[in-house]
Each structure stands twice: as C-alpha cells, then as structure tokens.
Amino acid sequence: DIQMTQSPSSLSASVGDRVTITCRASQSIRNYLNWYQQKPGKAPELLIYAASTLRSGVPSRFSGSGSGTEFTLTISSLQPEDFATYYCQQSYSTPDTFGGGAKVEI
Amino acid sequence: QVHLQESGPGLVKPSETLSLTCTVSGGSVNSDNYYWSWIRQSPGKGLEWIGYIYYNGNTNSNPSLKSRVTISKDTSKNQFSLRLSAVTAADTAVYYCARGTKWELLAGAFDIWGQGTMVTVSA
C-alpha cells in the first residue's frame, strides 16, 4: 500500500493567515492526489483533485501543488469557515489511501 | 443533484455480519463514470477505503479486509450494499458511502459522500 503522511497534524492559525499543509507519498503517485475538508460530524468534502485542480464552487483561496511524492495544500487567507481537518488521498493505485489529517484550529 | 444515504443497524455483535445499504438519488448506479464506494473512519485508523462496485458488477476491495467484504448492488432500487463479516471491536467506525470518479473525470477522487452512519461492534 502507498503510505500518505501529512504534516503538521495540527496547527493554530488566525483569520487572514496563509496556511500550508504538506502531504508526502511513500512512492511516486504522479499527480493522483486529492484534498478534502472535513468539519466535525460531517463527511469529507472534495476541494482539489489531480493535485492542483480546484473543484467547481471551491473558493479560489484554496490551491494545491506538487507531483510525484510531495504535495501542498495552501489556503491564502484563512476564513472562519476554513477551520476544519484536511485530508489528502492518493488515487494512483488501489487500495486508495488517505493521509492522517491536518487539523486547522484557532 | 446526486445524493447518497446510508442505512443499516448502528449496533452489531462481535463475530456477526455488518450490513449497510447506500441509496443513490439523482444519479444511477449503472453509470460507467463512477465507482460506488465504501469508506470508513475510526479514531484509531483514520479514513480507510473499504472497496467499490462498478456499473458492470465488478468489485474491488482493500486487501486488509478482502476476505470479509462483500459489495453488491440492486439496480432496481438504485442501491449498493456492504457486508462485512466476522466483525470485531476494531470495525467500530463511521461508515460512508461515496461516489468515486474515473481518472479522466476527477482523477479518482470521491466527489459525493453520504452523511455517514456510526456502527458500533459490541456485545
């Protein structure tokens, strides 16, 4: 299985801050990397697919980059509704695997 | 607008079989663009992909669970189902059904999720 490692696992930030979360794969996954946002008691929601393509309707303050084994999710200016946990997921090979999550809190 | 809804018992006894159903509305389990998937989330193991069923009935599941997992679909009801046998406390989790996409659509991402259902394994 491909292991996905996220860092940091949690971070404290303020409204307006620029936030960057990293996801590393145990082997190359090309650009088959997807990002999700999850709020307490809710299902994850897709934000970005193919490493850098913003899903329709997702605010442009979210962006993704990377390929191969290292990827980043950036929130350019943190908004109150962005406090949540973020997960990466590789879809390069089955079994699909997820990172352990990065919790963004105040 | 596609909507997925899980249903099934919230409590299962150890060694018994967990059975869940996902009802799809606004879309079809017969679409060849999607993989109808099950994913679970537990505090100890995070998000774990369980498996999927494709429009033609082909299935694939996580090797860590493969011998215990059965995924099926009922086209007439536009539903797909999960059976997980010989459950233990380690199978306690929130279970989600989700729509997985083909690579050429959304790079294999899960674009639609059900709200999730908590299943506890306990005597």
Image: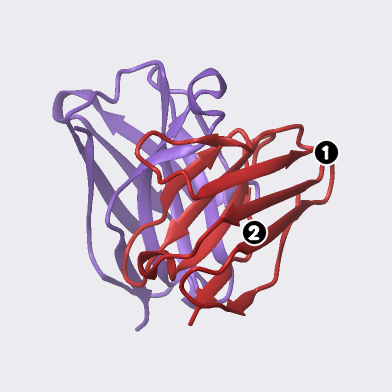
Chain colours: A red, B purple
Query: Is A45 in front, or is B40?
Result: A45
- For the residues tagged 1 and 2, is the chain the same? yes
- Mark pair 1, 2: CA separation: 15 Å
The kind of secondary structure element at disc 2 is: loop
Inspect the image, locate mark 2, and give the three-letter code of the amino acid beneath it.
Answer: Gly
The answer to whether one can see residue B46 in this image is yes
According to the picture, the residue beneath numbered tag 1 turns out to be A28
Q: Could you classify mark 2 by the number of other residues whose Cα lies within 10 Å: few (under 14), some (14-19), or many (20 or more)?
A: many
The single residue placed furthest to the right in the displayed view is: A27
- Secondary structure beneath dot 1 equals loop
Of residue B11 and residue A72, the one placed in the foreground of this image is: A72
Q: In this view, does A48 lie to the left or right of B33?
A: right
Q: How many labels does the image show?
A: 2
In the rendered image of this protein, does residue A12 appear above or below residue B60?
A: below
Residue type, label 1: Ser
Label disc, if present, on residue A99 of the rendered structure = 2
Q: Mark 2 lies on which chain?
A: A
Contact between labelled residues 2 and 1, with CB atoms less than 8 Å apart: no
Image mark 1: chain: A
Which callout, 1 or 2, points at the residue further toward the start of the chain? 1
The relative height of residue A11 versus residue B57 in the rendered view (above or below) is below
* Residue drawn where x is 27% and y is 56% of the image: B115
Residue positioned 45% across, 52% down in the render: B39
Task: Name the spot of residue B102 as percent of width and height, x first.
Answer: 50, 23
Question: A29 and B25: which one is in front?
Answer: A29
Q: In which quarter of the view is residue A69 placed?
A: top right
Q: In which quarter of the image is residue B36?
A: top left
